[in-house]
């Protein structure tokens, strides 16, 4: 039983949806009545729109229902093109997708800058505008009365009959879902998952949050536009009512029900809503109430939808089967750390104030390759602020920050990351829904550019980069001693391992400067040993390491240069010996002075 | 002048929605998309009470306040309280609003139902324009409500606690503010308010199931213009949206009413995303 299950699981995942598509395609040819066939056609169109919504809502994490307006744009574009005498379906599909893409960009650029409710509301508004815009161009679109006179579509010069049209619809959908699948199962998909959970983490590994969201929203316009073209040629009549707000709610409910963060969930959700809504008249009357209930219950109870539920079942079965058969995770040797090219990080006269609170004043710090530069100081002395300024999360009020002489102050965090600065966080950011291996792999995003096109078409460059990503992630995990946890879910790790995961992630992209923010706190002694050993090895390999740390003993042991911050200023700096014997440091940082000893004992 | 007055009156309706948004926003940092749908239910209660049963308007107002307050309490309990991820509130409040619309559709159908106004429906000459009495009352009530709520927020313990919560809910909790209960009370209060307004809004908009979505979005535009969290901003935003709508409908064409408002929303979001009257805070990691 268990071995049979594992054999089934060894079949590549894309075989199942392909099989499903083939079954769907033959349905009308085995005698299914036309009403059913038509329902399937409408379902597929709905699924295409839902798939676009999933990309921006489920994966990029922004609720925008502009896809309904894009659907309308695709449909009316096809109608206009057809009335102008161009009946070739392929040309119409191209034009419809472009029109939808244009609507996506125009509405996405302002809305995505803000995200959240502003984006949601402006996209809802966009849907309300559809009838107004159509009515403005009454001559061409027929306004509120609807558009008629669309010609029968042709393909390569031959008119398409209704059976062929069914096949055409399914082929278009099949191609889109292949594109969607290739996008999601690639770095781009991982980047989206990371960004949804933590925009901060995303920008720290070189992902531009705004651009990535915009791309997801815009790409999501394409299936909506395609669905519009297919819809226009199905009935050859268009009415503004087909693009109403309630339809947008049907789309959203399908997305929630099928699972917003899934590729094929769109099809499942669309089937349930499309067939459900049209089966009985009672359901039609109650349609809005049910749609609302799906949204309400879906939002409260299951984030993952039906596909999320199915996925967790599969994962549990996998685990049980492996446990039964005794599955061994692959052993990876960490190997020696190859030579690393560190960069000189130089912060000069950096000041930063939050309101009246001067968090950093006139701080100058130099970190050199092949050295561990430690920054210590009491809570609130500005250590983490300094790291945040360096990695581009805060803008400096004055002063410069340079990497190998190249000034980076004022650059966005993702640009700084691409310049070779990688970091860990005081509270580890561990994205949910990713395995440990995937979470580490994400750290390579900023490294070499791989285009979306190469992912969609699975070009050789895609395979090369994805292989390098996988190998490097395994090595990185081995370095921190986490390779046993490779396939576990990242967010199930305990705190100590989360920190090690962050270290692995910050190493995987071969950074030039590594910023470690209180990376040893919460680790047990063995883990600290692994970490200390690793830091020294990295230093010896030539990397620039900046260590913000509370553990004074550890700092003395690891650091080559120590900077002591107090109240936003550099109070002292020097090698560990100098710092350990600096009386002011003893007083400020450790809270002991030679004269103070008696009092301290008394307390 | 007639156009200006009509515009201000619609602006007042949108402002009333925005007031509800703001109270919930201050207490929970989220929007209740269903706010306008609660108002829509309020207009139906007004319709049933005044037009069908012929009850006195003050009694209907009180009943509506209680009923819609109860609906809001139910919504909070089912669709807000147990939502762990902030992000999902977008979906659940949307869902609640759609359910309300669906229920209204089931009971009363899609036809708009007129709601008679207590001071009659005779057109008055006022400041050189011609208006319905209800339109004047709407503007006055919106202004009075904003004044009353700002004063209340400044002077009463409840108000101060609410403002404290919106600044820093954790700190407020440490100071002994029961954040959960406050948020609930504020939510129910917006429901009561939506109900009380039913007898006022109904005569202007009619009771119709599809009222919710359009009002919800316009109310949001009002808030975006005025600034999220700003009470005074609502009056300005309401006036801007109402006037834009009526003036563009009159001078450019009926199809441009919504488009012009949308245009203003986009400009505001691009140029001053916090709105005209809200303070800005630096983003922190």
Image: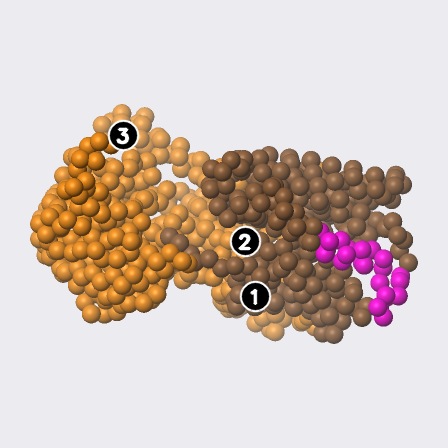
Chain colours: A orange, B brown
Give A273 or A275, whichever is nearer the viewer: A273
Q: Residue at x 35, y 45 (%)?
A: A431
Q: Which residue is mark 1?
A: B268
The image quadrant of residue A322 is top left
Q: In what element is the residue under mark 3?
A: helix
Q: Chain of mark 3?
A: A
- Cα–Cα gap, marks 1 and 3: 57 Å
Q: How many marks?
A: 3
- Which callout, 1 or 3, points to the residue nearer the camera? 1
- Cα–Cα gap, marks 2 and 3: 44 Å
Tell me if residue B128 comes above or below residue A51 in the rendering: below
Q: Earlier in the sequence, mark 2 or mark 3?
A: 2
Give B275 or A433, whichever is nearer the viewer: B275
Neighbor class of circle 3 (other Cα within 10 Å; few <14, some 14-19, many 20+) is: some
Left or right: residue A3 compared with residue A181: left
- Cα–Cα gap, marks 2 and 1: 14 Å
């Amino acid at each position: 039983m268990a071995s049979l299950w594992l054999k089934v699981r060894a079949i590549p995942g894309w075989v199942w949806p392909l099989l499903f598509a083939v079954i769907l395609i033959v349905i009308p040819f085995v005698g299914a009545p036309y009403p059913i066939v038509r329902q399937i056609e409408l379902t597929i169109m709905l699924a295409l729109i839902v798939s676009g919504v999933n990309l921006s809502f489920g994966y990029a994490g922004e609720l925008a229902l502009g896809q309904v307006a894009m659907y309308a744009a695709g449909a009316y574009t096809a109608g206009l093109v057809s009335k102008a005498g161009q009946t070739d379906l392929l040309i119409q599909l191209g034009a419809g997708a472009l029109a939808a893409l244009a609507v996506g960009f125009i509405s996405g650029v302002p809305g995505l800058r803000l995200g959240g409710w502003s984006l949601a509301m402006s996209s809802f508004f966009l849907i309300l505008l559809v009838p107004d815009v159509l009515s403005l161009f009454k001559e061409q679109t027929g306004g509120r009365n609807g558009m008629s006179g669309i010609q029968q579509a042709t393909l390569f010069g031959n008119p398409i009959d209704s059976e062929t049209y069914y096949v055409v619809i399914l082929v278009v959908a099949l191609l889109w879902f292949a594109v969607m699948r290739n996008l999601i199962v690639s770095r781009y998909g991982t980047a989206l998952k990371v960004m949804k959970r933590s925009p901060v983490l995303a920008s720290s590994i070189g992902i531009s949050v705004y651009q990535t969201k915009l791309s997801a929203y815009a790409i999501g316009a394409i299936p909506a536009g395609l669905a519009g073209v297919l819809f226009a040629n199905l009935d050859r009549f268009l009415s503004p009512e087909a693009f109403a707000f309630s339809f947008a709610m049907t789309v959203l409910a399908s997305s929630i029900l099928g699972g917003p963060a899934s590729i094929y969930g769109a099809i499942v959700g669309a089937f349930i809503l499309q067939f459900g809504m049209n089966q009985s008249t009672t359901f039609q009357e109650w349609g809005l109430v049910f749609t609302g209930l799906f949204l309400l219950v879906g939002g409260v109870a299951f984030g993952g939808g039906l596909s999320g539920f199915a996925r967790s079942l599969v994962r549990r079965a996998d685990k049980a089967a492996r446990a039964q058969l005794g599955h061994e995770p692959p052993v990876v040797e960490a190997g020696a750390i190859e030579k690393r090219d560190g960069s000189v990080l130089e912060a000069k006269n950096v000041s930063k104030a939050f309101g009246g609170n001067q968090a950093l004043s006139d701080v100058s710090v130099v970190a050199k390759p092949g050295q561990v530069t430690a920054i210590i100081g009491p809570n609130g002395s500005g250590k983490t602020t300094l790291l945040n300024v360096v990695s581009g999360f805060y803008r400096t009020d004055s002063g410069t920050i340079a990497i190998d002489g190249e000034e980076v102050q004022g650059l966005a965090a993702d640009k700084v990351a691409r310049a070779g600065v990688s970091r860990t966080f005081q509270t580890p950011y561990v994205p949910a829904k990713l395995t440990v291996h995937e979470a580490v792999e994400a750290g390579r995003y900023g490294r070499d550019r791989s285009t979306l096109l190469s992912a969609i078409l699975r070009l050789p460059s895609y395979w090369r980069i994805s292989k390098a990503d996988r190998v490097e992630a395994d090595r990185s995990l081995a370095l921190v001693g986490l390779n046993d946890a490779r396939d576990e879910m990242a967010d199930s790790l305990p705190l100590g391992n989360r920190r090690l995961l962050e270290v692995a992630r910050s190493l995987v992209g071969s950074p030039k400067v590594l910023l470690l923010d209180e990376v040893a706190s919460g680790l047990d002694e063995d883990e600290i040993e692994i970490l200390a050993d690793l830091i020294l090895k990295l230093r010896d390999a030539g990397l620039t390491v900046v260590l913000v740390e509370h553990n004074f003993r550890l700092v003395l042991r690891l650091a080559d240069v120590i900077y002591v911050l107090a109240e936003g200023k550099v109070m002292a700096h020097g090698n560990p010996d100098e710092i350990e014997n600096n009386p002011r440091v003893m007083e400020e940082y450790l809270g002991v002075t030679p004269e103070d000893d008696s009092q301290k004992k008394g307390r | 002048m007639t156009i200006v007055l009509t515009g201000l009156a619609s602006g007042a309706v949108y402002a009333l929605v925005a007031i509800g948004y703001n109270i919930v926003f201050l207490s929970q940092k989220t929007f209740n998309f269903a706010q306008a749908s609660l108002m829509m239910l309020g207009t139906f209660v007004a319709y049933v009470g005044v037009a069908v049963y012929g009850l006195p308007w003050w009694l209907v107002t009180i009943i509506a306040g209680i009923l819609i307050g109860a609906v809001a309490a139910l919504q909070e309990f089912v669709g807000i309280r147990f939502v762990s991820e902030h992000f999902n509130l977008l979906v659940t409040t949307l869902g609640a609003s759609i359910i309300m619309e669906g229920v209204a559709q089931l009971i009363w159908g899609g036809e708009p139902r007129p709601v008679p106004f207590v001071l009659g429906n005779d057109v008055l000459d006022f400041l050189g324009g011609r208006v319905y009495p209800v339109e004047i009352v709407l503007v006055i009530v919106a202004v009075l409500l904003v004044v009353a709520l700002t004063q209340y927020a400044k002077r009463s313990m409840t108000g101060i606690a609410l403002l404290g919560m919106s600044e820093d809910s954790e700190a407020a909790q440490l100071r002994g503010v029961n954040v959960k209960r406050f948020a609930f009370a504020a939510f129910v209060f917006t429901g009561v308010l939506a109900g009380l307004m039913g007898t006022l809004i109904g005569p202007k908009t009619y009771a119709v199931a599809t009222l919710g979505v359009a009002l919800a979005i316009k109310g949001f535009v009002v808030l975006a213009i005025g600034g999220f969290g700003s009470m005074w901003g609502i009056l300005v935003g309401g006036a801007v949206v109402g006037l834009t709508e009526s003036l563009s409908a009159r001078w450019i064409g009926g199809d441009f009413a919504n488009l012009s408002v949308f245009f203003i929303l986009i400009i505001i979001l691009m140029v001053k995303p916090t709105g005209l009257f809200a303070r800005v805070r630096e983003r922190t990691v």
